[in-house]
Amino acid sequence: MNAIPCQRDRFAIPPDVHYLNCAYMAPLSHEVADAMERGARRKQAPWNFQPADFFRLCENFRSKAARLAAVEADRIAITPSVSYAMAIAARNLPLAKGQSVVTLADQFPSNIYAWRERAATVGAEMVTLQRDAHSCWTGAVLSAIGEDTGIVAVPQCHWADGRIVDLVAVGHKCREHGAALVLDLTQSLGAMPIDFAAVQPDFAVAACYKWLMGPYGLAMLYVDPRHHGGEPIEYNWINRAGSEDFTRLVDYRDDYQPGARRFDMGEKSNPALLEGAGAALDYLLEFGVEAISASLAGQTGRIEREAASIGLGIPAQGTRAPHFLSLGFPDGVPDGLTERLAQRHVHVSLRGTSLRVTPHLYNTDADLKALLATL
């Protein structure tokens, strides 16, 4: 597969800024920023914002999110964050005393706190998995799933170092033992393929502001159809059946909009967020996730080879996500490393004892050279 040409001209990144930190926050493209501005300006003339627009905006975003995930639009709910989505999952999945919730060590807290609270409430156990520095997480997760496992709550790749979890294998073992599977895909969806039909998660969420290249404050939640009759965590009017007819909103109803829409957040019809996120999804759909993943793998692979040649530690072969690179320092992280990198306008993240390098299609050869020269 041919590499996607550099897309730097679609972003407001100065030539001397070397931003290799998409796992922290993606920069907005010109198209996304323009779409957000157009959306915000809709409220300058509310007389032109019709009742149908509340629904049209949401369904436009929902359909694009579904296309990216290769699932039906009815399976996508609109939420403001991962933590909101995890609260929905925690409310709707069974968990009993004596069962366990399986998570990874140092997992991002948005996929921890809801499960800690739920486990404490029912008397379940939190099982936090460890793994050695040279392996992926899959073996540890598979070994932990048994007859007493109630919920497995994991990412596709770890947010700190990018080490992967084989979700197809994990999903299969969850089904064997009747355990639910909940995924935080914030650090992978849009940059790494996932086959929802093969994995079969109960719930899966991704915040839009990282690898989905969109604005902060919006997330897409996948809900398996077996949970479409579940209980939302808020009771807003727009998710009820018949809410398109504003003249009958006080004819209160107990039924909901179809599919996962019952889990949508209140005031979801935010034009600035939805139109911006929609433009970001257009950008990803223009190339396709597989092509994006292959191009990013080319960039991280080049950095990995150069880093190894100057003595930096690199992940074991086949353990990391294609868009994620974690570099280690044999003698420990040098004092002031990220500050010195920033002085040269090289922007990456330090997570634990490793340097997290996460490029995207806007990065140039000059960005990669600046990073390696500084290191």
Image (cartoon, rainbow, N blue to C red):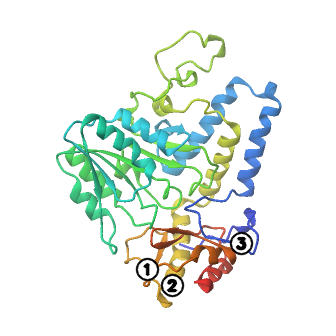
Q: Which residue is mark 3?
A: 17
Q: Are marks 3 and 1 in contact (CB under 8 Å)?
A: no
Quarter of the view holding residue 158:
bottom left
C-beta proximity under 8 Å, tags 1 and 2: yes
- Of the image marks 3 and 2, the number of the one nearer the N terminus: 3
Q: Position of residue 364 (x, y in %)?
A: 67, 75
Residue on which the image places disc 2: 307
* Front in this rendered view, residue 255 or 141: 141
Q: Secondary structure beneath disc 1?
A: loop
Q: In this view of the protein, can residue 80 be seen by the observer?
A: yes
Residue drawn at x 45%, y 29% is 232
Residue at 35% across, 43% down: 115
Residue under pointer 1: 314
Considering only order in the chain, which callout, 1 or 3, is on the residue closer to the N terminus? 3
Q: Residue furthest right?
A: 45
Secondary element under disc 3, as helix, strand or loop, is: loop
Disc 1 or 2, which lies upstream in sequence? 2
Cα–Cα gap, marks 3 and 2: 20 Å
